[in-house]
């Protein structure tokens, strides 16, 4: 019985390999689906924030009219077309965009495969406390992706597209520059929104305490505000819209740490 339950290091590697293989296969399937629909992936989704009738611009303008803040009504972007200066750049980013889209689409399954590998190493009590972890990880990631796409990406595109250091410089972005910026923003927000999960595990093993998070709360808020000021247009309303979810996630992390933190044993 004990020999069946205890696995050697090589057995663990073999088990990990098969979990990774299944996760990679799922990502590839999602990537193939995204690859064969380039119009939807690029023209509709990734280049959506470049259209003046993008849903975010319309909702922000309605909000601006309601609260008498015309700065929330953005004008047309100065660029209508994108240039590609390298022979294979469109094909290369078609592949990269499809891979990232495949990862986003299949993220819940990838998280489930990771959990299946970690779960046997936990005690029964730890497993019960981690019930629903795949659901929460997936929800946070999807929320981050949606936040990045519908709020952060259009604000970034509008700010950088309209930024003018001098009148003689015309903004004519390269295709690869735009796509890489959008994908980094979307995927980065998805990963950033996993902060409560990371804090959960760090607090669980005693590395980060709720007192530490509360002590540096002001520092964290300042960093969030600075980040929002950099990536949003130069108006207070946009900065607040970006900062609120990030500050909320930090406060949720403090709450989680308070519930699960265990002080290191002193014996």
Image: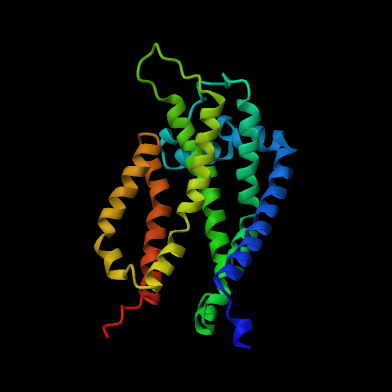
The percent position of residue 57, horizontal first and vertical second, equals 53, 36
The residue that appears at 50% across and 21% down in the rendered structure is 78
Residue 243 lies left or right of residue 18; in this view the side is: left
Spot the residue most to the bottom.
Answer: 1
Q: What colouring method underlies this structural image?
A: rainbow
Q: For residue 223, say whether it is visible.
A: yes
Q: In this view, does 49 lie above or below 262?
A: above
**Looking at the rendering, in which quadrant would you find the C terminus?**
bottom left
Query: Quadrant of the rendered structure where residue 168 is?
Result: top left
The percent position of residue 194, horizontal first and vertical second, equals 47, 58
Residue 33 lies left or right of residue 47; in this view the side is: right
> Looking at this view, is 42 or 241 the one in front?
42
Q: In this view, does 119 lie above or below 180?
A: below
The residue that appears at 35% across and 20% down in the rendered structure is 165
The percent position of residue 228, horizontal first and vertical second, equals 37, 43
Residue 106 lies left or right of residue 205; in this view the side is: right
Q: For residue 73, say whether it is visible.
A: no
Q: How many circles with numbers are drawn on the protein? A: 0
The residue that appears at 37% across and 63% down in the rendered structure is 251
> Looking at this view, is 164 or 261 the one in front?
261
């Amino acid at each position: 019985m004990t020999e069946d339950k205890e696995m050697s290091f090589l057995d663990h590697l073999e088990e990990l390999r098969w979990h990774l293989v299944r996760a990679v296969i799922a990502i590839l399937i999602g990537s193939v689906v995204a690859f064969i629909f380039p119009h939807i992936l690029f023209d509709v989704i990734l280049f959506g924030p470049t259209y003046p009738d993008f849903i975010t611009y319309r909702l922000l303008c309605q909000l601006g009219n309601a609260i008498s803040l015309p700065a929330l009504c953005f004008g047309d972007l100065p660029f209508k077309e994108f240039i590609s200066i390298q022979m294979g750049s469109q094909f290369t980013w078609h592949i990269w965009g499809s891979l990232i889209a495949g990862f986003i689409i299949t993220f819940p399954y990838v998280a489930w495969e990771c959990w299946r590998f970690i779960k046997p190493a936990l005690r029964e009590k730890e497993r019960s406390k981690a019930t629903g972890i795949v659901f929460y990880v997936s929800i946070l990631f999807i929320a981050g992706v949606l936040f990045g796409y519908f709020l952060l990406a259009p604000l970034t595109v509008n700010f950088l597209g309209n930024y003018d250091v001098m009148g003689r410089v015309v903004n004519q972005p390269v295709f690869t520059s735009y796509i890489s910026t959008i994908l980094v923003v979307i995927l980065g927000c998805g990963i950033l929104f996993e902060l409560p999960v990371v804090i959960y595990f760090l607090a669980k093993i005693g590395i980060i305490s709720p007192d530490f998070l509360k002590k540096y709360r002001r520092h964290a808020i300042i960093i969030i505000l600075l980040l929002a000021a950099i990536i949003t247009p130069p108006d207070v309303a946009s900065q607040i819209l970006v900062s609120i979810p990030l500050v909320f996630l930090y406060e949720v992390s403090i709450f989680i740490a308070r519930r699960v933190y265990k002080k290191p044993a002193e014996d």
